[in-house]
Amino acid sequence: MSTAVEAPARPSVLQATPWVAAAWAATFLCLAALALMDRAPHPWTASEASALGSLTPVEVSWSLVVVAAAVLTVAGLGAEARTPTRARTSGAVLLALGILVTVAVSDVRALAFLGYLPMTLLATVDVGPAAGHLRWDLVTDSAAAVAHAVGGVAVSVTGARLLARANAIAGRSTSWRGWARWGPPAVAIAVVVPLLYAVTRIAWVLDVPLGIRRETLADLGSARYAGLGLALFAVLGAWLTTGLLARWGERLWPWVPRIGGRPVPVAAAVVPGLLVAGAVESAGLSFWRMLLAGELSTVPGVTSDWAAWGPELFWPVWGAALAVACLAYLGRRTG
């Protein structure tokens, strides 16, 4: 008689988030500690386009040591929590730390890395407008910002899971259904704002000085194609955002090979959406910092060229709306 052996279930994205959070914390704890002992370069470099622009790399390294150590400690305590109070406290602390890392330690360089990634890959083989102008120090700085965004989201999701665990220990269920009603307005905002940005950059490529002087457009030269890369990224993101309400966002199109017609995993839509939301929020706060600190001179053109910096000031609204849209999608799919 044969005995059927059940295959082990694959770990979901949500099950992997505590490990991603721990990996981020352990990695940057070690890097920052080595930097403070003068054994390695600091893992964060100063930039005007950062919410932490007024801090020095040494100060940020100390901050990373404290935050990373707190993440590891609280996550460990939360994993061993057997009472709802301890699990709820651990979850709330991790949620707050994750948001802090996502929107403050990460910055506009994370969004730039994602938007310029296709152009960067082409430049490595001497193709495209960035060919011959690729600076690897900027690439590594941007990659570190992406790592902070990923780590921050993972820490936040881990905190949210601990809050759900606290409810489970207390004998209560966790429901996200209340967010569902905010889906349509949140999606609308998260679609309109990036398209407004994209219109200006596409106009520049078409030699239309929308929101900037003709002289500024001429000075941009081939750099306008870099803006086109971000514009296309924004258009793609806006289209994907509509999937948080559309039918194809819940079940794949039947014509897709092999996986057509299957339900879209909830985490496959929510986790990347929250990652982009965090990167957008951080980038928007970076532009607000430059505006309030009088450092808009780092943006191409002059301050009267409003399209060079004006659309970016709405990015915090975009990021918040996208995060709400993801939670609404979660509520609708799991309600």
Image (cartoon, rainbow, N blue to C red):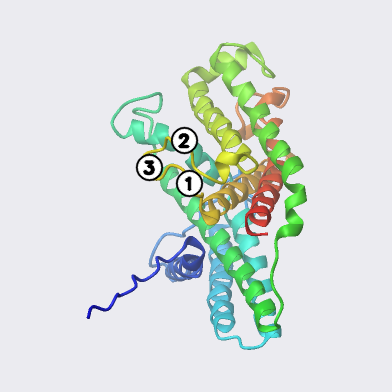
Instruction: Select label 1 or label 2 by which is in front.
Output: 2
Label placed on residue 116: 2
Apparent side of residue 33 relative to residue 315 in the rendered image (left or right): left
Mark 2 burial class by Cα count in 10 Å: few <14, some 14-19, many 20+: many
Q: Amino acid at mark 3?
A: Trp
Instruction: Select label 3 or label 2 by which is in front.
Output: 2
| Mark 1 → mark 2, Cα distance in angstroms | 10 Å
Nearer to me, 259 or 74: 259
Label placed on residue 321: none
Label placed on residue 142: 1
Apparent side of residue 37 relative to residue 206 in the rendered image (left or right): left
Q: Residue at x 60, y 56 (%)?
A: 102
Dots 1 and 2: beta carbons under 8 Å? yes
Residue 173 spot, x, y in % from top left: 69, 73
Q: Amino acid at mark 1?
A: Ser
| Mark 3 → mark 2, Cα distance in angstroms | 13 Å
Q: Amino acid at mark 2?
A: Tyr
Q: Which residue is mark 3?
A: 136
Apparent side of residue 278 relative to residue 37 in the rendered image (left or right): right
Instruction: Select label 3 or label 1 by which is in front.
Output: 1
